[in-house]
Image (cartoon, grey):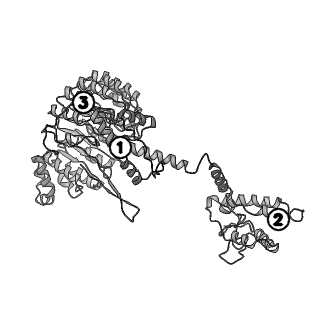
Amino acid sequence: MELCEECGGSRGRLDACAQCGVWLHSRCGVRAEGERSPLLCPECASGNDRKREDGMDEGRVLRSRARGPTAVTSGTRKRARTAGSSSLRQNAEAPSDSDGADPAISMTAARPSENEKRDPIPERRGRRRSADSNQGPNNPPSARRQRFRELAEERASNFAVGRGFVDDADRERIEDENDTATAPQTGRTGEQPEVWPGPYSTAIHLLNKRSAAMAAREARSISRKSEIAWTPKGSGSTFKFREPTLMDHCVKRCVDKVEELLEEGLLGEMFPDAKAEVSKELCRQRKFNGEILPHFAEKHTSVLTLPDCSYLTEEDLLSAFGQCQGPGLDQVNLGFCGRGMSDQALATLSTDSSNIRELTLEGCYRLSDNGIEAMLKNLHKLETLDLSSCPRISSKTVGNIVRYAGNTISVLRLRTAAQLSGEDFLPIAELKHLESLCISENTRVDDRSLIHIISKAGSKLQCLNLAGCTELSDTMVSAVAECCPHLEEICLDETQVTDVGLRKLTSECSSLAFVSLRSCSNITDEGCIHMIKNCKIKRLSLNGLYCVTDATVLALKRYCEGLEELDLSWCRAITDEALGQFVDAVQSLRLLKLRGCSQVTAKFVGGHSNPDLEHCRRVFFSLSITPLEGFHMWSVVGTND
């Protein structure tokens, strides 16, 4: 607690002396020129009077007073008080006039320096002196700003091409391979123009480099034309989207006239599948609320599908579960139900509905281990369980799943369970009939824990989703290849798998029909071609594999005649000619994603001859940026072509 240096009291407002910095009450100090003049302690005030008498420059005193009282926070009062006391001691130890010292020298020593005038707190003065000392001819003040500006420019370029953060060595390697390195632009004087690392300045800088990048891409495409020859067969640059079915038209009509259907009571006469589709569309349009819910949760309901329950309260769910519970309820799929789903609501649902085979509870942030345990005790025929994004579950829930549903459950999804470690998933190895396992987006899962699970429960596994498990490597993939002979679908997005692990996996698991390798930066053409030769793949995702080239596309043309879906988004080393040959040859292709592939031109989009290609998407934005005259802002126009 700060105390007044004069009276020793702590009550009332304490101000700092304008010269020495000690704390004192206003009544204990002196204001020489009225209430608005700076506060001085008695010693500093008497010293100023002596200066006037000795003929000192009165303007210097007035300038010192004009600084006003220093406003500091409570956190720095103690430091300022300590500094003021030390300055008083130093002034007391200085030689006085009576000791024979020169008065001019003593008054010069007592006068604050320029740094003290700018900042009366000694600690901040020290930081200012250290900062000033760092500025010199070898370390100019703008060096730090220049370094961060260059860093921001490099990162912005990486994000613009969809690669995210890469280090300098990786960037140089990519530029050397793709021949995309561009010389820095200079002004008339030969100096580098200043580019501030803001969003609009960065966009303008990238816009200026666009012509050079386009020229480099054209040069690469010209060099590859001699290797890959393709003649466009199409006649127009058009996109073909999936035509809506009769069910789609009926569902849309029901959603538009839902109020009339509720008044007439016609929703209850719908088939369960049609009612489920109507509920999905209502949730998608954010129209599903507590007033509509009772009409979808009637007594004889067998399928209750609500993808978005964010508008439903706990009372709404309790009322609905009380109506639809019974032996006829077979499937319950609830998404975004954290607001209304509690332990009590789940107990109400599972009390008299022992025949539920499929249960999805996504985003239940209120569910605890005790509530899930009570539910598992009542559901004796549970085959599919989805507890994704439930942050309150622990290893106890995983053990209870094995304990109460270990003999029946075949599909288990525990996506985005960041609170669980790799060891918490180990009880899954005791599931005897596990066919599908999803533990994606769990960064704490490592090779050791997953190998233990796969070695015991992988004999019947057909689907494995490990997307976002960034700690997994080739060691785990080799274990999957040895222990999962019936594997048909696997998702390895954002893992550390390389060509070695992919070769091992596709050599042993030849029945793979769906493979997703999104953002697996260690995968190249070698691993992809080996996979394509050994597996009859129907759906494949190579999203973000910037090392994949035309060689992979030509291998797909030769070996994957039954391919139906392909994702080549952000694969910018693929040309129109390779895509044209592939799409013309593989007539079974129904979906092709080319998001971010700016090198794909209208030559391929309108030139391929596959009439059944439902959706050929080439989405990227062309920025037209021009400064508005008279304003410090920019107009940005985006075009989607």
The answer to whether 38 appears left or right of 502 in the picture is right
The answer to whether 262 appears left or right of 99 in the picture is left
Report, in whole angstroms, how far the alpha carbon at label 3 lies from the one at label 2.
Answer: 91 Å
Residue 303 disc label: none
Image coords of residue 142 (percent x, y): 55, 50
Query: Between tags 3 and 2, which lies in front?
Result: 3
Of all residues, the one furthest to the front in this rendering is 188
Identified by mark 3, the residue type is Ser
Q: Earlier in the sequence, mark 3 or mark 1?
A: 1
Residue 104 disc label: 2
Circle 3 sits on which residue? 226
SS assignment at label 3: loop
Choose between 633 and 487: the one closer to the eye: 633
Q: Residues within 10 Å of mark 1 (few under 14, many from 20)?
A: some
The answer to whether 29 appears left or right of 434 in the picture is right
Q: Is residue 259 above or below residue 155?
A: below
Of all residues, the one furthest to the bottom in this rendering is 34
Quadrant of the drawing holding the N terminus = bottom right
Image coords of residue 341 (percent x, y): 31, 49
Circle 1 sits on which residue? 212
Image coords of residue 258 (percent x, y): 15, 57
Residue 409 in view (yes/no): no
SS assignment at label 2: helix
Report, in whole angstroms, how far the alpha carbon at label 1 lies from the one at label 2.
Answer: 70 Å
Circles 3 and 1, Cβ within 8 Å, touching? The answer is no
